[in-house]
Structures are given as C-alpha cells and as structure tokens.
Amino acid sequence: MEFRHLGRSGVQVSTLGLGGNNFGARIDEEQSARVLQKAIDLGVNFVDTADVYSNGLSESFIGAALAGQRHQVILATKVGSPVGQGVNQGGASRSYIMQQVEGSLNRLRTDYIDLYQIHLPDPGTPIEETLRALDDLVHQGKVRYIGCSNFLSWQTCEAVWISHTLNLANFVTVQMEYSLLNHDIEREVVPFCQAYRIGIIPYFPLAGGLLTGKYRPGEPVSEGTRFFTVPKYKERFLTERNFSLVARLERFASDRGHTLSELAIAWLLGNPLVCSVITGAMKPEQLVANAKGAEWHLTSREMEDIKALLHPQE
C-alpha cells in the first residue's frame, strides 16, 4: 500500500481508503468488522464515515471494530447532514457541531477525530461561525484536521480566505464526487485545490458500481445492489452515454490486463492532488480487488489516451 499526505498536512494516508457508508445499512456489525479488519491487513489506514450514516450505526460499528487498534487508522467523519426532523438537527452552527462531535466521539470510542468534515454547505450559518467552532475543537484536541465535503469552489474559497484572515484552522481536504464518469470538479475545484494545496478525497469513485462492470445495458438491476435500493442512482447513472463510455474504458483496461474498477481507481490516483480514494465494500475480497487499482500507475501517455476516450470530440 502506498501513502500520500492528507492535503498540506504532515499526516499520511493510504491511497486506498475505506468508506463506512455500507456499515449498518447493507451489512451488519460482524460483516463490517471483517471488512474493516481486512482493510487494515491490506495496509489501508484511512477510514471515512459520517454521523448520519445508518443513524450513527456506521460510527458505532467502526468504533467497536477498532478497539485496541485505533492507533492504526486515520479516522475521518462528517457533521452537518440532518439526523432528525428538528429545526436544529442539522447544519453547521456552533451549537450543532459542538453537540454532534460528542456523539461521534462516543460512538467511535475515541478521544479525537483525525479529520472532521462539514458534510454539506449550510446557507443558514455564517461560515465564520462554523470555522471558529472547528478551530476550537482543534485547540481542544478533539479534532486534528478539518475538511469540507460537497462545497462549491467559491464556498471553499470563502472558507479558506476567512481562515487565513482570522488565523483559524484551515480545511486541508475537500471531499467531492469524482470519477471517470463524473469529473466536473476539474473545471474549478481541482485548479483551486492545486493553487491552495488542498487535498481531494473522491467519493463515488466507481460511480455507484457502474465502473465495476456488473451492470449491462438492457439487463435488470439485481436486488441488493445500490441501484436497486436507491432508484435515483439508477436513473442518474444507467444512461446510454455512460454505458458507451464504460464499454470503451473496459476495453482500455482489458487490453492492459486490468479490470474496469482497477482503471477507475488508478485514474483518480493519476491526479497527485488526490489523497485517498474512498471505496465502499461489503466483502473483504472487494477490498483486495480495489487494492490492485491503487497499485496500478498509469503513464502520462495512458492518462492522455483516457482523456481522449472521455472527450472524443475535443
């Protein structure tokens, strides 16, 4: 397993990360523990979850599985997504952050969170209030580093500018959807992160499973898959355009002795700003397969060839 710096911080994370979104939602505690242990055995040291995943079960499962080996992982979680119907049960206010961090620490069975991320922009809270609350958590030792997720480029820029101006803890990472099938962040977010040395943590690197090759045009979606359980993903990803791209990319990978999913991970890691590619897994063997993608180093020529496949008319 290889490692990269978490943005401009001094800490290093494995290029393959483990996402906890399946824990409690699609697999039980015992299965989650097996997946997490396999990740550690493979050298994965970056685990990402959120307080909202499975109503806190994901954090609880991770906390239990890491008993006695917390020191082996860089643990990331998120705050901000609504966890209830109450008017103050979501967002990025000081009140909500201070309340939720205690819950995350308890569920994760830890004294500190390595990377605490704002899950979503909160238009109802001034970003200065959010940043001052996060800065306090850093000074209290409850949080080591901070980041954001799903922020637009201008929102990230505003946060970085305010942190610089007020000498507050600054975002070291942004977590965004980024894959061979969705690379919109390359227009503005990627250049911004390059200029300010902010790391990128892609989510949905396999486009919800479409980049694993298990979905075929005209074939029904199997029960238990992400596209079966979340219909909006099926409508969004299973398009004629995407199937056409997948076919071209699959041929590219096969010609080089690799799978489509390995190509999806290797391509993301071809961007030096990417710290770690978060992949979900329901079985330990899925992690073994994903690790092969992290080991594949695409050449500059191969990266150009892939670009031509993604943008055939340019």
Image (cartoon, rainbow, N blue to C red):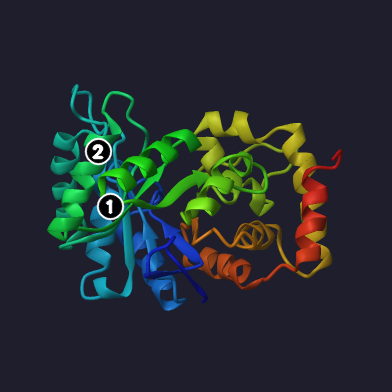
Is residue 252 left or right of 283 when viewed as pictured?
A: right
In the image, is residue 92 above or below residue 169? above
Q: CA distance from mark 1 to mark 2?
A: 11 Å
Residues 92 and 170: in front is 170
Residue 47, horizontal then vertical, whole percent: 37, 61
Quadrant of the rendering where the C terminus is positioned: top right
Residues 176 and 161: in front is 161
Residue lying farthest to the front in this orientation? 165
Residue 153, horizontal then vertical, whole percent: 49, 37
Q: What kind of element bears circle 2?
A: helix
For residue 249, the mark is none
Q: Which residue is mark 2?
A: 130
Residues 25 and 89: in front is 89
Q: Amino acid at mark 1?
A: Ala
Looking at the image, is mark 1 or mark 2 nearer the viewer? Answer: 1
Q: What kind of element bears circle 1?
A: loop
Mark 1 vs mark 2: which is more N-terminal?
2
Q: Is residue 248 visible?
A: yes
Q: Which residue is mark 1?
A: 169
Which residue appears at 80% of the width and 68% of the height? 256
Which residue appears at 21% of the width and 49% of the height? 135
Residue 236, horizontal then vertical, whole percent: 61, 31
* Number of marks in the rendered image: 2
